[in-house]
Amino acid sequence: MKKYASLLMLGAIVIGLLAACAPQTVTVTVEVPVKETVEVPVERTVEVPVEVTPTPVDYGKVTFISTQCVPVEEAEKMRGVILADFPGQVEFVPADYATFEDTVLAEVKAGKGTIDVIGALHGQFPTLLAAGALQDVSPLLDEVKDRGIPEAYMELGKLGTDTQYFIPWMQATYIVAANKQALDYLPAGADPESLTWEQYRDWAKNIYEATGEKKVGFPVNGLLHRFLEGYIYPSYTGGMVTTFKSPEAVEMWKFVKDLWQYVHPESMSYEFMQEPLMSEEVWVAWDHTARLINAFKERPDDFLALPSPSGPKGLGFMPVIVGLAMPVTAPNPEGGKALIEYMTRPETQITTLREVGFFPAIQVDFPGYVAPGIRAQGEAVTKQAAASNAIPAMLPVGLGPRSGEINKIYRDAFTRIVINDEDIETVLEEEAANLQTLLNETGAPCWPPDPPSEGPCQVK
Amino acid sequence: MNLKRFNWEPYLLLLPSALYLVFFLAWPMFQAFGLAFQADDGHLTLDYMQRMFSDVMFSAALINTVKLIIAIVPLQFILALVMALLMMERLRGSDILVYIYSIPLAISDLAAGIIWFSIFTQRGYLNSLLYGLGVLDKPFLFLNYQSNWPFAAIVLAEVWRATSIVFVILVAGLQSIPRDYAEAAEVFGANWFTRVWRVTLPLLRPSIQTALILRTILAVQMFAVVVAIAGRGMTVLANEAYRWYSEYRSPHLAATYAMFILVISLGTAFIYLRALRVKEEMVL
């Protein structure tokens, strides 16, 4: 038995070696339509539609850097499952935002690169665009036009210009995950599918009073700033920036302080809420869908996926769009384009959802084999976006390289008001000044949910 | 000077480390200096400095860093000294002690932080133990940011992790002191404490100086242990430098924080060098 196994192994190695040694050049029939006028800068490779014959194609080595799917488990799923069927060797490079931006910008500055494809959040592209790092990916539009990518998402991919700079890849948002044990403590008459933030607080309070434990958690060491910018601010004030120090905002902060009495104190260390949920340290948690996915995947019968609660102004929520783009220095542009086309195929999109918990950016029905937990999460996401009082709040785009600083302002306001117990009006006044300085210095116009502005967005 | 007679050898031998220091320490330091005091368009500015001092997190970070240094360094020093003296008594099995004391040296600070986090967290080892023993009827929240426990946990983790560095330096120092001095003192009737106080410690001064400088500088830069244990519940200077760089994406502010850490490190090194000055005639 053992002998056979080693023989098989040997065979596999030999085949592998042969495959590796095989010539990389593959004959490809190229049909160039004559009417196509090529208007490209001289140094750029000419982009022509390529008709590939059904013979196996090898796009060679394609390097794919991404700020998403960075955690080791997700990166392994990308390499081992999602990218496995791509005809070429994809080197998937997960990178945190800082490393990602520095790498791409350095390559563009050097005029010579290794990266072919960029996967990043919608809000992470403007800096790259400003540095002239992004290629026009319009030639891909034809290939993905029947994928059913929502028009609004395609528009985001133009980054406020007339040129398509990224193709929407996947989407995510933030929802609430609840352990079914917590349902017993829901305030009277509350529908878990459409809670208000007040009911959410009462829920936390009921749990605390009944069990003596604070079992509602927030990812303070994770994406708390998105809760402040995209959820609680729009829900209470209807805006994110213009209403920063409004009377409604003062009421909102009073509410957050009130809620915080019943929030698990170890929230300060939580980065991903799926871990404390699964250890049952907390029962109810708000977080990014990709950071809750394991709880739903591993114990679909124990957890409920709920839309985020709403406030007096509506249900503020933040849709997260992840896009695929190509740097101007891509060494293998054909491979890069093929990879983008591959990533937006319906079957790849479903695999992506199943493996890493990001939802398709294309129109696709959830097939039967998607795990029940993920299906539940998907339904909560749809309900949240389709709620009649939904207020979609976008990631800031006009701040360019300084888009990280706005998070600090919201976080500092939170730390000062909720953790350090400073006076709300004073803090809002001071942080609003910081916010206005940032907006003035970057000249960023308002973005949704704030009404459009002429010139820099103004805090009222 | 006759060039032929000039001995190039020592300089040649020093060259690799000198080059290393220039390229990997001096040059980045110089660049950080530029980032901290130069705006993007190249003119000199104190803006970043002003922003750092007026940053709401700055004073908390500074105070926490200083508090941690005051709590950790003396504790580590005394512990390491006791351990080193114990070693030198050459008791049976003391060789094994060296290995046991040095284990944490091999563990990265982040790993050490995570180990101590898993001890103190709500579902951690300590709570499980106390619950199992019947001391607690429900988990105690050691890492509650409103209590002093996270601070204590950080001190404990740092003491556990980095005492061995001080220990190794002190043991090396102790081993270089000839035993004759202690024996001579013993002949004159000095007891153990007198010998340590009057003979060993003064002779150990150069090692103590090195150990304290190294330890304090490392404590000023303390980062991963704090992040692992306290998360956002507590901040230190290195933490702010990191966040300004990687989260808020301002290399200028990050460099300004780094320069500030450098100044504190230089300051403490200078104080130690002055306070524990080794007079020429004392070096035997």
Image (cartoon, helix red, strand yellow):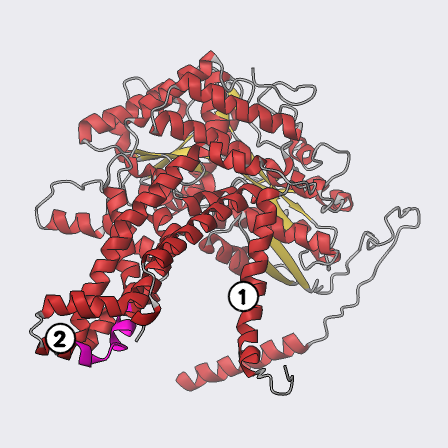
Describe the element under mark 1 as helix, strand or loop.
helix
Q: Which residue is mark 2?
A: B185
Q: Position of residue A418 (x, y in %)?
A: 36, 26
Neighbour class for label 2 at 10 Å: few (<14), some, many (≥20)? some
Residue at 14 percent of width and 70 percent of height: B195
At x 46%, y 28%, the residue is: A228
Q: Compared with residue A314, is residue A263 higher up or lower down, i.e. above or below?
A: below
Exactly how many numbered labels are in the figure? Answer: 2
Disc 2: host chain: B
Which residue is the extreme one toward the right?
A: A34
Question: Is residue B178 a member of the stretch shown in magenta?
Answer: yes
Q: Is most of the magenta stretch helix, strand or loop?
A: helix
Q: Which residue is mark 1?
A: B21
Question: In x, y percent, where is residue B38?
Answer: 63, 43
Residue A102 in the image, given as x and y percentages of width and height: 61, 50
Return the residue nearer the eye: B261 or A85: B261
Please give the range of residues in magenta.
B170-181
Camera sees residue B110: no
Q: Nearer the viewer, mark 2 or mark 1?
A: 2
Q: Is residue B143 magenta?
A: no
Q: Is residue B217 left or right of A173 when viewed as pictured?
A: left
Tell me the CA gap for discs 2 and 1: 44 Å
Which chain letter matches label 1?
B
Amino acid type for the residue under numbered disc 2: Ala
Q: Is residue B124 left or right of residue A134?
A: left
- Which quadrant: the N terminus of chain A? bottom left
Name, please, the residue furthest toward the top: A247
Q: Position of residue A397 (x, y in %)?
A: 63, 33
Q: Nearer the viewer, residue B281 or A362?
A: B281
Q: Callout 1, which amino acid?
A: Leu
